[in-house]
Image (cartoon, helix red, strand yellow):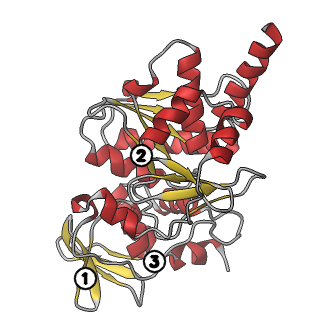
Amino acid sequence: MGFLEQIKEIPIVDYADRLGFTLVRKGKYFSIKEHDSVMIDTIKNCFWRNSNGASGSIIDFAIEFKNYSGAKEAMGAIAFMYGINDGKPATVKYNSIPKIEQKSTADKSENEKNNSLMLPEKAKNNRKVYRYLYKERCIESIVIRHMAAKKMFYQDVKGNCVFVSNGFACVRSTVGNFSGDVSGSDYRECVYIKYKVKADTLIVNESVIDSMSLMSYFVKTGKRYDDYWYLSLCGVNKLASLYYHTQNDTNIKKIILALDNDEAGLKATDTAFSELKNMGFDENNIVIMLPTKGKDWNDTIKEMKKEETKIG
C-alpha cells in the first residue's frame, strides 16, 4: 500500500476525535458538536460541510480544520500523528467507528472514565515499582511519594508499573523496555498531572518516567516541581492531547516542550511549536527545554546521580 493510500485509509472519525472534536451520531452518519454542519460518512470515509461546501478525504478534513497550507503539509502531519513512515504500517491504532457516549468526556467523573479502562490486576503492594523508580530510574523519593499519594501508579500482579490518569493508563515493565497503553484509554487525555488547583505553565514530556525525572531535576536544582502541570504523551504521536488540553484548560499561558533530544523528539518539538503558534500562543510563551545530559530527562538525572556518587 502506498503512502497516500495509507493516509486515506485512516478513518476521519478517529482523526476528528484525536483533534478533540466531540463526535455525534446523525442517523447513519456522524457529525461533530463543535461544527454541526459537518457530516462524515464512515463507509466511504469522506466528509462534507454544509455551511461552506468543503468536502473530501481525511486530507481535505485536515486542511479545513487545521488550516494546513496544502495536501503535502496535511499528509505530513497526519503521518506523524499515526506513526506512518516509509510505507510501514501505522504504529498508532485507530478505530473505524467511534464509541459515542451519552455524556461528553468533559462531563464524566474520573471514576467513570477509569471504569472504561481494562486495567491490569493490582498486586498486594508496590515494593517492586518503588524500587524500580528509585533505584533504577533515580527518581527522587519525594516525587515518588507525591505521585503515589495522588494514586497515579501502582504495581500489577506481573510486577509492571501501571500509570493511571483521568481516563488513560499505560504499562511500563520494571524489567526490560516493554511499554504500552491500556485498552480503553482516552488518547485526548494521556497522563495529565496536576498539583496545584491552578497553574499557568504546562510541561510536556514523552513519558511519565520523563515527567517524574524532570520533577526530580527540579528538586536537585532547588526548584519547586509542583508549581507546574505536566502532560506525559506516552510517545511522540499523541500531540493532539497537547492541543486538546491547551484548548480546554484556559489557565495555561505558557508551554514548556521538554521532549527527547533525538530525531523523533526534535521533530515532535518543531511540530508542536508551529501548531501552538497557529493556535494563537505567543511564541515567547513556548519554551523548548532539552535534557541537559543524554537523550531524555531520565538520562539527565541518572548522570547527576553518578556525579553525586563520585563526589560522595
**What element does badge 3 sit on?**
loop
The disc, 3 or 2, on the residue closer to the chain's N-terminal end is 3
Spatial CA distance of label 3 from label 1 is 15 Å
Q: Residues within 10 Å of mark 3 (few under 14, many from 20)?
A: many
Instruction: Give coordinates of residue 125: x percent, y percent.
Output: 59, 51
Q: Residues within 10 Å of mark 2 (few under 14, many from 20)?
A: many
Picture residue at 68% right of the left edge, 30% below the top: 138
Residue occupying the point 64% across, 27% down:
291
Report which residue position mark 2 lands on.
192
Q: Position of residue 90 (x, y in %)?
A: 62, 69
| Mark 1, residue position | 25
**Residue where numbered disc 3 is placed:** 11
Q: Is residue 297 above or below residue 275?
A: above
User: In the figure, 70 relative to 51: above or below?
Assistant: above
Horizontal arrangement in the rendering, residue 200 relative to residue 171 (left or right): left
Q: Amino acid at mark 3?
A: Pro
Closest to the observer, 29 or 61: 29
